[in-house]
Image (spheres, grey):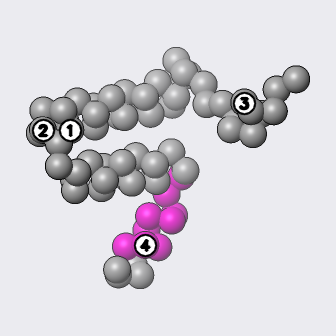
Amino acid sequence: MEQALLDQALAMSPNERVEFAQLILASIEHEDEKIREKWITEVKERIDAVKTGKAKLIDFDSLYHED
């Protein structure tokens, strides 16, 4: 792996890194092209929902340690 590519990926925000990783994984999975496109669209819509305030991220630790 090229260090420059890794450095660029690590410079992204956490949400951008997740989107980037999902796009990479989607490119190597052996699923139907239409299904892959729908998942990529879904991921982008979810990221947009968080960015625009339509959805809210939940901290993993607080989710599993609620009282």
Which numbered circle lies on residue 6? 4
At a point 75% along the width and 39% down the height, the residue shown is 61
Query: Nearest the camera: 8 or 59?
Result: 59
Image marks 1 and 2: residues in contact by CB distance under 8 Å: yes
Please identify the quarter of the rendering in which residue 46 is found. Answer: top left
Image marks 2 and 4: residues in contact by CB distance under 8 Å: no
Residue 18 in percent (x, y) is at 46, 48
Mark 3: amino acid: Leu
Mark 1: amino acid: Arg
The stretch in magenta equals 5-13
Q: Is residue 67 left or right of residue 30?
A: right
Q: Residues within 10 Å of mark 1 (few under 14, many from 20)?
A: some
Reading the image, the residue beneath label 3 is: 63
Main SS, magenta residues: helix
Q: Name the N-terminal-most of marks 3 and 4.
A: 4
User: Spatial distance from mark 1 to mark 4, Cα to Cα?
Assistant: 24 Å
Reading the image, the residue beneath label 1 is: 36
Mark 4: amino acid: Leu
Please identify the quarter of the rendering in which residue 37 is found. Answer: top left
Query: Nearest the camera: 38 or 10?
Result: 38
Image marks 3 and 4: residues in contact by CB distance under 8 Å: no
Residue 28 in percent (x, y) is at 22, 56
Which secondary structure, mark 3?
helix
Reading the image, the residue beneath label 2 is: 32
Q: Name the N-terminal-most of marks 1 and 4.
A: 4
- Residue 12 magenta: yes
